[in-house]
Image (spheres, rainbow, N blue to C red):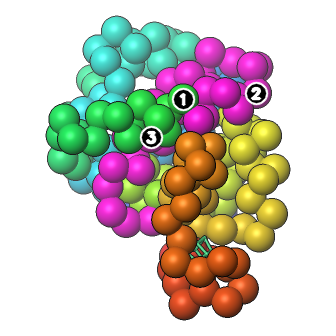
Amino acid sequence: MSDLTVGVVGPAARIYGALMGRAAGAGNDHALACMIASSHTGGSSLPARLGLSPALFRCLAEHHFPGTTLSAPGPSGPTVGEARTDELADLIRLMLVNKADQSPSEVWMARIVAAGCMASDHLWCDLGLWSRTDLTELICRNFPTLAARNLKDMKWKRFLYKQLCETEGIHTCRAPSCEICDDYPGCFGPEA
Ligand code: SF4
């Protein structure tokens, strides 16, 4: 969990605190409480209900924060256009084939992370997390075989798309290797 959590104040901190007061003690409680608090207060780029259907969001809320009376967050970012539904589905599939198989939460998290990839900032910001560390921990916990392939700490959104490219046999990189690529800072630079 990020140290930055203690620096968040105001409505987001109050929502986070209310949710964590109900937390079930599951691995994704903290990350989801951050995302929901941020989404309620304009601090993320996720669609309504973190990109989940009403039924899935209800399952998530009951699993992680049983008995909570907090309403589902509305949209903080644009909805996914039809042109990107295949891309969204590919990202979800990539994460599902690499999930830890420890919790039903991994399936919801795959959908949420893919929804965050549709926005344009750093992935941890688009998801409404409060630090990149929280995102790294989330990926390691939910999709460990995927995380294990990010040996050089590539930016997470770039990394997920690069995995898709390699899976599908598509090569969009302009250089033969990262070491000699002009885009290196875009893929590996600081993510803050
Ligand atoms: S640094 Fe260049 S070669 Fe490496 S993943 Fe990024 S774009 Fe592709």
Instruction: Determine which quarter of the picture holds residue 162.
Output: bottom right
Q: Is mark 1 on a helix, strand or loop?
A: helix
> What's the residue at 77%, 40% (across, down)?
144
Question: What kind of residue is marked 2?
Answer: Ala
| 94 lies left or right of 180 | left
Q: Which one is in front in this view, the residue at disc 2 or the one at disc 1?
A: 1
Mark 1 C-beta closer than 8 Å to ligand 1 = no
Is residue 51 on the magenta stretch?
no
> What's the residue at 47%, 35% (across, down)?
90
Q: Which of 22 and 58 is in front in this view?
A: 58
Q: Earlier in the sequence, mark 1 or mark 3?
A: 1
- Determine crowd level at label 1: few under 14, some 14-19, many 20+ residues with C-alpha closer than 10 A: some
Q: How far apart are marks 2 and 1 (CA)?
A: 14 Å
128 in relation to 99, above or below? below
| 50 lies left or right of 179 | left
Provide residue 131's location: percent of width, then percent of height. 56, 62
**Could one spot residue 134 in this view of the protein?**
no
Give the labeled residue for mark 1.
93
Provide residue 192's location: percent of width, then percent of height. 51, 76
- Determine crowd level at label 2: few under 14, some 14-19, many 20+ residues with C-alpha closer than 10 A: some
Is residue 98 on the magenta stretch?
yes
- Determine crowd level at label 3: few under 14, some 14-19, many 20+ residues with C-alpha closer than 10 A: many
Q: How far apart are marks 2 and 3 (CA)?
A: 17 Å
Question: What kind of residue is marked 1?
Answer: Arg
Instruction: Determine which quarter of the picture holds residue 98.
Output: top right
Q: Which one is in front in this view, the residue at disc 1 or the one at disc 3?
A: 1
Provide residue 88's location: percent of width, then percent of height. 38, 37
**Could one spot residue 34 in this view of the protein?**
yes
Give the labeled residue for mark 2.
100
Instruction: Determine which quarter of the picture holds residue 4.
Output: bottom right
| 82 lies left or right of 119 | left
Give the labeled residue for mark 3.
114
